[in-house]
Image: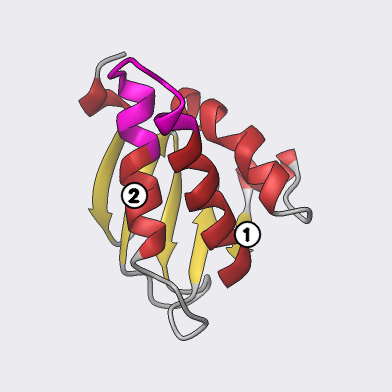
Amino acid sequence: MQKADYFTLTTGLAEGETVQFVDGRWPGKIGAGIAIREEAFDHIEPHLRAVAPDWTTGHRYGVFQLSVGARARLAKRLRSVVSDSVEATAKNTLFMVLAEWLEERPDADSPVSILGL
């Protein structure tokens, strides 16, 4: 899988078999986001599970509200994985893009949802 295949920056709901991190709460207005292909999300899910104890595999097929604290912990964790790696890979690019996106949303006034398949 090439870099462009792992994720797409979005506005509104994404189509296809993706898990999408988005600005906003569902149901409601959905803003900017990152749609991540299901197989690429497999790389992120263990890190998400570690920082968001309420996350379950079932949320891949529904909606999950990502807390402010979990956003910060996930971004830090993804950056740590990349900094420990010596290779430039599509997975590392995905981790960095998602970490940066999450860090741009540091407070409770900017709700972030994860929309499953």
Horizontal and vertical percent for residue 65? 61, 66
| Residue that numbered label 1 is attached to | 64
Q: Is residue 27 magenta?
A: no
**Residue at 35 percent of width and 34 percent of height:** 94
User: What residue range appears in magenta?
Assistant: 81-95
- On screen, 43 above or below 95? above
Q: Amino acid at mark 2?
A: Ile
**Residue at 39 percent of width and 76 percent of height:** 29
Horizontal and vertical percent for residue 18? 43, 38
Q: Earlier in the sequence, mark 2 or mark 1?
A: 2
Q: Amino acid at mark 1?
A: Phe
Q: Do callouts 2 and 1 mark residues in contact (Cβ within 8 Å)?
A: no
- In the figure, is residue 17 to the left or right of 57? left
C-alpha separation, residue under disc 2 versus residue under disc 1: 15 Å
Observer able to see residue 10: yes
Callout count: 2
- On screen, 58 above or below 105? above
Q: Quadrant of the N terminus?
A: top left
| Residue nearest the viewer, comparing 86 with 34 | 86
Label 2: few (<14), some (14–19) or many (≥20) C-alpha neighbours in 10 Å:
many
| Residue that numbered label 2 is attached to | 34
Label annotation for residue 114: none
Q: Quadrant of residue 48?
A: top right
